[in-house]
Each structure stands twice: as C-alpha cells, then as structure tokens.
Image: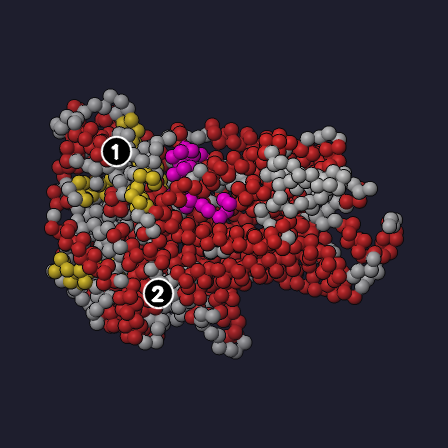
Amino acid sequence: MILDKKEIQAVKSKKDASGIIISIIAYIFVGLFAICCLLPFLMIISASFSSETAITTDGMGIFPKNFTLEAYKILFRTPKYLVGSYVVTIGMTLGGTALGLFIISMTGYALQRKDFPFRNGISFFIYFTTLFSAGLAPTYLWMVNTLGMKNNYLAVFLPLLMTPWLIFLMKNFIKSIPHEITESGKIDGANDFRIFLTLVLPNLKPALATVGLFLALQYWNEWYNTMLYLSNKDYQPLQYYLYKIINQAQALRQSVAGNQVSIENLPSNTLKMATAIVATGPVILFYPFVQKYFIAGMTVGAVKG
Amino acid sequence: MTTKVEKSGQKRNRFQKDGIPIKQKRNIWKDIKTHKILILMCLPAVIFFIVFNYCPLPGVYIAFTNFNYAKGIFGSDFIGFDNFNFLINSNKLWMLTRNTVLYNLAFIILGNLLQITVAVLLNEVAAKWFRKITQTLMFLPYFISAVLVGLIVYNIFNTDVGLIPSLIRSLGGESMSFYSTTWIWPIIIVLVNLWQGTGYGAVVYFATICGMDTGIMEAAEIDGANRWQRIRYITIPGLKSIAIILILFSIGSILKGNFGLFYNIIGPANSLLMPYTDIIETFVYRAMMNQQNFAQASAVGLYQSVFGFIIVMLANSIVKKVDPEYALF
Amino acid sequence: MKKNLKKVLSLMLVLAFVFSLAACAGESADSSSTAPASTDSTESTAADSSAEESTLENTDVDTSEQVNINMLVLGNKPTNGRMEAAVAAENELLLEKVNATVSLEYIEWTDWQTQYNLRLMSNDTSIDLIITATDWLYAWPNSKKGAFLALTEDMLQTYAPQTWAEIPAEDWDLCKLGDTIYFIPEDQYTQWTNHGMFYRGDWATEAGLTDGVQKFDDLTTYFTYIKENKEGVIPWDVPGKNNMAGIISGYIASNSDYTTIIGTDTGNFNLFAYQGDDYKTVVSPYLDDDVLYDAADLMKEWNTIGVWRDDVLNYEGETRELMYAGQSGADQHHVQTYIGLQPNMEKKQEGSDAQMYWWGYENGNYCADLKTHGAMAVNASSENPERALMVYDLIRNDEEIYKLHNFGIEGTDYVMTDDGKLDRPAGWDQSTDALDTNFWGGRVDKYEPARVTDYADKDALFAELAAGAKEYQLSAFAFDPEQCPTEIAAVADVCSNYFPLLAYGKKDDPKATVDEFREQLKMAGIESLMANIQQQMDEALAQ
C-alpha cells in the first residue's frame, strides 16, 4: 500500500490516548532519571571548587563551600605534562577508534553472513577469550619479556583495539541489514570486501556511532595498562596521569613509605573531584556530536521489489 | 534464487536448488576458497586475539606452581592445587560465590530491564533537544570512578553530615545509622550500579531502536496500532536478540565481581556489613594484601573462569535449542 | 554522505597508522630486550666476580667500558627537571671515577605494591640497583624468589670497599638468608618511625594534663576535655576506613611488655610477639591475655564519648589537614612525621604546641628502627653488578656525589646556612621544586645536615627516644609466609572482620566480642600458624 506524504501525516496526527500517556510517562521518567544522574555530578563540581576542610565538616552539597581553586591549581601545576597527556590520549583515542572500528565492523560483517561456514567456529574462538585469561603475571611477562613492549605506547594502544563484546555487538547490528544488499552486490560482481565497504558500511551509522563511542571511551578511560607498561614515560595517558597525582598523596599518607618523604599539604578529596572533572569534561562536550548518528534507520523499501 | 537458512549445526551447502536439498560432501578447502575474502576479513581480529589472549594463556599454569622469579613460570615447582587452598579452606567460598552471583544476577537482570525501559521511553520523547540533553546527562555517571562513587555514597548516607540523615533530622525525625545497618546495602549497591550503568547500556538499545526498520512502524501505525501496541509488539521484540547477546555475555563473567564498586562503597574496614556485601574479589584482596602472591591470584582467576565457562556453555546451549539465531555461537 | 563518511574514515585510518609509526620510533632502547623469563644468574654471576681480583683497589678493576647503572626507586617520576640536572652533574663525577653513569627508574605510587613486585618478577636486565626494605618493601620474599643477586664478601670488598668497611658484621647478618647477603642495609642513618599519637599541648594543659600525655589513659582525659569544651572539633578524627586496626596495638604496647615480631603479619595485622626478654618464644596477646579485654573496653568507652565520628569505619578524611585546621584534636602517626608536623602546627595553629605520645612511652616498650628499614639490593639479572656496587659505594660514601644525589645542586636546590643547616633558596616550593631522587637505601648520618624546617628539638627528642628504646632481638629472622598460606589468609580474614569492630568500639559487649574473636582465630588455624612461626624461628636462631 503506497500512501503519499499527506495521507501519512493525516494518519500520524491522529492522537491516541495511549500515545499521550506514554509521552507523559516518557518525559517524566527520562527527565527524573537524567536529574538523578546530574545531581551527583553537580556535587562533584561544587566539591572541586570547595575547600578541603569545609567538605569534611559539612559534607558535599550543590554549591561550593569556601570557594577555592586550590585543587585545580595543583592539577595544572605542570601544564606541559597535562597537555602532553591530553595529546597522547586524544591521539590514541582517535587512532585506535578508527582502526579498531574498521576491523570490528569488518569482522562483524563476516561473522553475521549466514552463508559463511566458519562463522560459528571463529565466533567461539573470539568469545572464548572472555572466559579465560592467564592472569596478571603471565600476561605481564608475555608483554614485557616476549613482545618487548615495556615503555612503548603500543602496549596500551594495541590491546584495546577490539574486544569480543564489541565485535558481537557490531555483528548484531549488521544482522539487521538485509541479506538482499549483499546479494545485489554480488550480482553486480563485487567481492565481499567491496560489498562491505561500499554497500554495508554507509548504512551502519547508528552501529558505528555506538561501537565507536564505546571503543573511544575504552581508550579514554584506560589507566591500568598504562600503570603496568608506561609508568616511566614522560607523557602518559590522561586517566593514569591524574590517578598518579591522587595516589601520591594517598600513598604518602597511608603507607610506611610516607616516612621517607616530607608530607606536603595536598588536599585529597577535593583533588579527586577536580581530577574527575578534568578527565570527564572533554567527553561531555564530545558526546553531543556523536548523538547526531543515532538517527532513524533506513527503510528497506528501496531494495525490495 | 531462494535462500533457506538451515540450522547452524548442519554443514550442508546453504543454497537449495529447485527445492531439492543437495547433500554435498563437506569439503573444507572448497569452503575456504569460496569464502576466502570473508576469511581474510576475519584475519586481523583472529591474529589480534591469538597474540594478546591465546599466547599468554599457557601461563595459567602458574596457578599450579610455587612461582619462583628466577625459574620462570614453567620452571617453577609444580604444587598441584595448593594455591587454591586458601580459598577453599576459608569456609567462605560458598558465601562469597553466592554473594557474587546474586549481585551479578541483580545487576544483569535489573540493569538490562532498566536500560531497555529507558531506551524505549527515550525513543518516545518527541522533542529532540530534550532527548539530547537527557541522554548526555544519563551518560555522566559512567565516568565517575569507583573511588568517587564511594565518596558520594558516604556523603549521602553518613550519620553526621550526610544528605539523607540531615534531611530526616531537619524534618524532625531520627535517622538510622546506615553504615551499621546490613540489609539496606544490597539495595543501595544495586541502585548505585544501576545508576552508573544504565545510561551507558541504554545507548546500545537505543541505537538498535534507531536501526529498526521505520517502514514497519509506519505501516503498523497506519493499520491502527496505537503507541503502546507499537512498542509492545514491534520495538520490544526487536530488542530481543541484542538483549540475549548482552545477557549471555554478562553471564560468562557471573563469578567476577565489580571490585571497585564494592571496595570503595563498603571499604575494607566495615566488617559489620560484610556477610551481605563481601564478594570474591574483596575477600582475596584483603587476604593477599601483604603477599603479592601472583600464583594465588591466578588461581582465583582460574576458579572464576572455569565456573563462568560452564555456566555460559549451559546457557548458550539452552538458547540454541530455543532459537539458534540468538545463540552466541 | 557516503563520501564524507569515507573521507573521515580514511583520515582517521591515516592518523592511526601515523600514530603507530610514531610509537615505534619513540620506543625506548630498553623495550627491545628479549631476555627469557628464566635466568639462573645468581650462582654464576657470583662465581664470575669472585674470580676477579680481590684487592681493595678500585683501580685494579676493569672499568674500560662505560656502562649505565639503572636504579629502581619508589615515587612519582619528577617533572621539574631538577633530578635530571642533579644526576647529570653527578654523572660527570661518576664517569671520572668509575666510568659509569647512573639513571633512575621510578615505581610510581599508583598500585606501587603490584608494580614493584611485577618489575622484579619479570627479571628485567635493564635494572641494576633496587631499593628495598625488610619491613615494608618485600625484601625477604623477593630474596627468596630469586630477584636479588647474592652478594659475596669478595664482591663487596672489591667493589664496595668503603661500604663494606663501615658496616659492622652484625648489621651484615641482618641481610642474610642463611649465609648469603642479599642486600646492603641503610644502617648508618638514624630514623625513628615508631608510632604514637600527636596531640596539642595547649589543650592538654587546659584539660589538666600539665605534663602532657604521660600514659595511655591520659588520652581519655584529653579526648573527653575536647569533646566537652571544643565546639565543632572531633577529638581524633580518624579515617577508620584506612586504619582498620586502630590503636589497639598501641594500648597493648603501653600496658604490657610484648614486642611484635616483625614480618609475621597476617594481612596487615600484627598478632605475634615475644614477651619481655624471652625472644625465643612466640606468643600472642590477641589469643590469650587480658590486656586485650582492657583495650576493647577502652575503645568502647571512646566510641561512646564520641572520640571519632559515628561512621568512622567508612570515613576517609585527612586527619592531619584537619588538625592543621583546628578541627581535629589529634592525629596518629610516627616520629618522623612528627618532626615535620610540629613546626607546621606552630605556623597554622599558633600556640598549639604539638606534642607526641608514643606507644610505650611510660614503660619503655618500644624499639629502635630496624637497620634494614631501608636497603639496596642488586638485581639478579643485572648485566653490570660489579659496576653497580661501585656506583653505590660512591653515592653512599663520596660526600660530593652524596650531596648531589640526595640534595641536588647547591644554590639551586638547596643552600647551607651559616650554622651548618640545610635550607632552601628563596622561592623554593616543596610541591614544584622537589628533587625526589628518593635514595632510601644508603643514607648516612654523617652527610645529613639538620634541616632548617625540622623540629628544633629533634636531637633532644631522638636522644630521649634512644635512651628508653629496647633493642629488637629478632632482626635476622625472616619469616617465610609461603609455608602456611592457608592459615595466614584465614587468620587475616578473621582479623579484618573483628579488628575494626574492636578498635572502634562498635560492638555492645566488647568482652564477648573478644571471646568470639579468639574462637574464630582458633578455628582459622592460628595455633598451627604460631607453631610454624616458632619452628621457623627455632631454625633461624640455631644458625
């Protein structure tokens, strides 16, 4: 049944009772949840601008107490290194996301092809790695001694390129693209890779945005591999660099090591808050751009018939 | 050309000709040749996992050794299951496993339910600006590190200056001491986990909804289905496959607890709450705090992995029986 | 749309490849090491070097090849360039004398326990010298696991003659496993790190304690006074989350003659001790002595008074900061911290007259610091152990090199006052200009001038401490926890359950809780653990 635009509009404008109720519920629920998510964040922002003692005496609130920039001053003390951290992190995030996304979608496409006899075997092969891991010591020895990755940015860049979860996620997204597209490509004489590149990829916007987002976040938030392999590099990925500052104060205060160094007056809790803001800030600004890709999907009508 | 999808267990040629199934001898080389491009496309990922996951895997042998640095993993003395003793003989293994599994189940089930709800409702919000803003806001908690989460929770619930006790007191009531009350913490922990993970997880569902065929939706609308019916009969079933995949994935890690969350909210000192909130990771951390015993750590990981493996194989085979397309493999 | 997508993708791909290339180019030389995980160098290297000439002259040793000695230290890598400048100046001298340079590699504070042990585990040939300590930096476990090179007397005499000569035989004995020396003790450096409670002299006087806190129970008087008279001040605002054991051990020290046996801790709790002069018998006041009942009762009393916050077990505040701000009446740490805290308190809370009551003040039940609280080991897989020892010898004993390494360049990093004290140049700020070479493995008193910022009466304090201190009799005993890991883990678990409750008085009936605690300890196997400790100790003392 082919309707023209006007008739479709006419039908859509018929409001039904359930629609209104659902709209109301949607706005309220989503709105409330968003506020729940925002409030603690406001608390963190305000605490980052408050004085340490005010926080411990009065607790955290929505507005800063004894407004001070002390925590931020400490963070920005050596701007060269902070900027270096940002550059390294952004570089790795962009590069890693691009490369990883490409490989992930390529693999995901191959694995969802029902006519590909090896897909179950390879899927299991990939999935199995989420179940078993050798543990810290063997992995460390492998990376440092055999692969020689100590003090090399690749030690952080490479292992994060893909995860089984992202591959499966992508595979599932691609499944919703009808097989007809592949077939029509084959009819035109293209090989699988060309089909993937020219016919499938362009239709994967929400999928690419989603997986790309998760991948980028993985790179952005990473600190553990940095701690293991990059702790003597001058410019370290951001999260680890920020953790360092917090942990220094903590380690010196709590551990026996603290007796060796004169303990300086580092505000601790407010420092943690300021760190969180500095680390998260850029991503919040970047997220709205990604949202553009969460648009309504394509219609199949063009291919059928 | 008609295509027919066969059960993935059967290795026949998938394309029928003239409606008569053709039994072809399974010829791997022919398959490789036909699909060589697809195989090449999978190659980077396969190599990746070989290098970074499968190669170090033999090192799991360390869990059975008395690891000596000079001798290396495979040169160290074999001691059988001795490294597992501290876990088994602690008399806590059952309690810890139970806590870990129950919490994870709550996280998985409630988490996915909430994420689906949020994604569906988000889709029903017409005003784009509202949707954009709320989606960004919902994403924020994911970024808050576990340490900060612990601090925030403390700031909300502590008796002296916490938000909630202060509120209760200002209303004239007598606030209970949250940090001395055991039963409330499973609830709080689950809520915190939901708060942190929902925005992030809802993105997947939301993207799936965006990728859904709008033609069907419009056709349904024209046919007279109201919003609720459209949600119930089209949107939600459309999310079934992704939900099952996500859940199956999470089940593999059902014995692996979220150390950061528990350690920072409950802390190592509040043993009043521990019977309700202690998981495998926090116990191991406290037990091994001073020793840096890598072999023991690997032993614990192995225990968690083996159980997760068994459970996931079971779950996947069940799903496969119901509908093979939803299974992971 | 398709075109844009393609463009963006290709741009990002190019970025990715360029980035990978840059990463490869920036790879440091060290990372190309492909040394196998297992080496058997401990015996062979020792044999090799004892084949060298064993005269005491450095000049007879072959130093024709220039090498770099890499020292592993703890701390965040400094970013202000001071360390590099100081080390460069130092290297000029080192090159002259032994044709070697020194470089520092840092184990940063994030998860340092894991990082430190991982580094040692991986048998990295690029490390030569390693900072360690027997009581907090895993010296014994790493020696046993083959991370450190065995140091023979010949080696030490040949390559580190000055160090060898200045350390007496009994101090060398403290570093031996069996008959082999595994690290060099920082024994010529006086530090006091015994714990106690800092309190304010002015408030103590107001509370009626004219001579300050003289015994443990005086603290109760002090805290009660603050609670009743100082509005908004928490007597001792301790973060229970980070102090699980509280100060029960302090109470026991001050009210008995138990001395803790170092190295037998179960997950950060020190249960085992010897009593009085009988250092050959392992006992535990936590298992059977009424002093634990008294301690638990007192802590309950303190909880009722309100010495700490209600939710102390989850509280994570910075007590020192609060004390500086006048919001906490006390802080608990050790003497070395007190020396820095005292002048600071005077600056921030004028007239506060910060004092310290250390555990065992009234009955002299405290020990001097272990001589192996700081130590330096040589990496078992080091490629230049001989040169490493020579460099260490110079840093420790050559005054010019020592000062460069530990204090920096005179004029820029420090200045000497007319009365021989160490001061900082104008505008120097601890947080931005610190040297951070963290050489905690070979400091010596003779080259350490008094600091202008130190507590003025530091020497008097040290003298007072030295006069009353007991000597720890079991320095050479290295307990091997791997003989009964199960019991240790189980006991550690019981401790982590009960200690916080007892230490902060969170249970209504302390006596019953203590009884329960003891029951649980027995079920966890504490008696067989104690028997094992006793057995190991007997073996160690027999040698």
Q: Are marks 1 and 2 on the same chain?
A: yes
Residue that mark 1 sits on = C41
Q: Residue at x 12, y 60 (%)?
A: C278
Indicate the chain on which mark 1 is placed.
C
In the image, C108 versus A4, the foreground residue is: A4
Residue C364, relative to residue A176: is it above or below?
below
Left or right, B104 with respect to B96, comes to right
Residue C300 visible, this angle:
yes
Highlighted range, magenta: A128-153
Disc on res. C316: none
Residue C461 visible, this angle:
no
Counting from the top left corner in percent of width and height, residue C89 is at 30, 30
Residue B28, relative to residue C214: is it above or below?
above
Number of labels in the image equals 2
Q: Quadrant of the C terminus of chain A?
A: top right
| Comes first in the chain, label 1 or label 2 | 1
Counting from the top left corner in percent of width and height, residue C406 is at 28, 39
Indicate the chain on which mark 2 is placed.
C
Three-letter residue code for mark 2: Asn
Q: Residue at x 61, y 45 (%)?
A: B9
Helix, strand or loop under label 1 = helix
- Residue A134 in magenta stretch: yes
What colouring style does the render use?
secondary structure
Residue that mark 2 sits on = C497
In the image, C284 versus B230, the foreground residue is: B230
Q: Residue at x 26, y 29 (%)?
A: C384
Residue A214, relative to residue C329: is it above or below?
above
Counting from the top left corner in percent of width and height, residue B131 is at 69, 54
Three-letter residue code for mark 1: Ser
Q: Residues within 10 Å of mark 2 (few under 14, many from 20)?
A: many
